[in-house]
Image: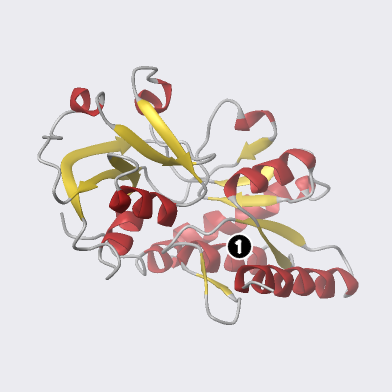
Amino acid sequence: MKLKSLLALACLLASLRCAAAGEPPLVFAYNLFPPWKTMDAHGEPQGPYTELMREVARRAKLRLAFLPCPLARCLQYMRQGKADVVIGVKNTAGRREFIDFIDPSFATGSRLALYQRSDDPRPLHSYRQLYPFLIGVVEGVRYQDEFDGDLRLRREPAPSLDSNFRKLKAGRIDALIADERQTAELAADAEFHRHVKRAPLLLYSPEPRRIGLAIHSQRYTHKRRIARALRSMLQDGTVARLLAQAQKPQS
């Protein structure tokens, strides 16, 4: 059995143990999003967003269970009410049909970096210079309103950011886009650092980050408890302390 399958099974077994203990847990649809949502070698979810959600659940007196899934499947679970909560997922009109992005927000918008192959001489200083490029994106991810809605851009979807870095290295795409912190970690990896370079162009998504609660979830009645717990964490500095674990990379 593959490692990812073993990790997913471990989290699902943990979920079943929680359910057996009494009240059904708050099921966290858990897509990996390094460095904020990761798993260690033992399959234990970790990272700042993970710890933030654990603390929210603790203060709201709710037990938390993790359901690992790629983003597109996580969103489907939320739509079906099979999962209860997501965190850090971009708020869009389509997603608001089945997810309630509750107040307060816990973080400001994000900076989006672009990478090219290190031997690509084409300039990428302005948005318009993106048009000749085939740009790697991750399936299901929303980046920025202008970028997402621009029909002149050519996009090539992949299941993960790692896949896009490999495609860029192999010359199958011309550029990739992702969160600045996430791309910095992968670009520094020995597999990629000599083959890719960061482009000068930087895009910004102003949408604040929120916890999302599935509208069709049986735990939707806990919305006020979750919002109250998060508000208390913002007021006492817990959120700032947890998010500081993922320091912003140098430009």
Going 39% across and 68% down the picture, which residue do you hit? 241
Label 1, secondary structure: give it: helix
Left or right of residue 4, residue 65 in this image: right
- 140 and 123: which one is in front? 123
Extreme residue in the bottom direction: 42
For the C terminus, give its image quadrant.
Answer: bottom left
* Residue type at the position of mark 1: Val
Q: Look at the picture and state if 27 lies above or below 207.
A: below
Viewer can see residue 61: no
Going 86% across and 68% down the picture, which residue do you hit? 19
Q: Give x and y (percent) for residue 1.
A: 69, 74
Viewer can see residue 83: yes
Q: Give x and y (percent) for residue 110.
A: 34, 45
Going 22% across and 63% down the picture, which residue do you hit? 193
- 144 and 96: which one is in front? 144
Q: Which quarter of the picture shows residue 14?
A: bottom right
Left or right of residue 192, residue 103 in this image: right
Q: Residues within 10 Å of mark 1 (few under 14, many from 20)?
A: many
Q: Give x and y (percent) for residue 32.
A: 53, 59
Q: Which residue corresponds to mark 1?
A: 56
Going 53% across and 69% down the picture, which residue do you hit? 51
